[in-house]
Amino acid sequence: KSYHLARGASEEALQLAWEIALSSQHDDRSKGSSHEPLDPAVLQLIRALKRLGKVILLQKHHNDALDCFLPCLELLRSSRTTESTLDTASVLGSLGFLYLKLKRFNESSNFLRECLRLYRKNGVDVNDRETKKIKAWLEMAESREED
């Protein structure tokens, strides 16, 4: 029952995020810029949806987790101020792991490589626990790509 409540909450949050993002993007386009930062409310919703996606992923509801992570990535990439942040790297890492679980190894490798690139760009230590975890997942995905 709690899963279904959480799923309903995520759908409501996603709908609200899209409405805010679309109105923000419309305002940015009318100014002729995608350099404007995302509305702080949109960023909060992205982070909440990302956390919810991780919970859903841990419950092994893979497709539902995709429904959380893919819109997060799209919203983060919609602004040049967030397309290269650690928030984006975190979503990419989650998507890489999710696609690894779904045995979609090429997609997994692509997301994990991009995650590592953003970690480097943002100065995350190569010996950081998260970096090591992403590298291990990437090795698994790459070893299975050829299978």
Image (tube, grey):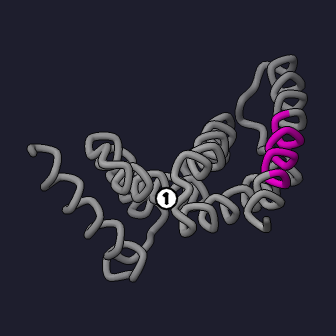
Highlighted range, magenta: 8-18
Q: Nearer the viewer, residue 135 or 67?
A: 67
**Side (left or right) of 131 relative to 37:** left
Query: Which quadrant, please, contains the C terminus?
Result: top left
For the point 31% across and 76% down, which residue is it? 132
Q: Is the magenta stretch mostly helix, strand or loop?
A: helix
Q: Dividing the picture into quarters, in which one does residue 125 lie?
A: bottom left
Q: At 34% from the left edge and 41% from the top edge, which residue is drawn?
A: 107
Evaluate whether residue 117 shows in this view: no
Q: Which residue is drawn at 62% across and 37% down?
A: 74
Q: Quadrant of the N terminus?
A: bottom right
- In front: 88, or 147? 147
Q: Position of residue 49 (x, y in %)?
A: 73, 56
Residue positioned 63% across, 68% down in the render: 55
Q: In which quarter of the image is residue 101?
A: bottom left
Residue hosting label 1? 94
Picture coordinates of residue 37, whole percent (x, y): 77, 44
Residue 22 to residue 131: above or below: above
Q: Is residue 80 left or right of residue 12?
A: left
- Nearest the camera: 61 or 138? 61
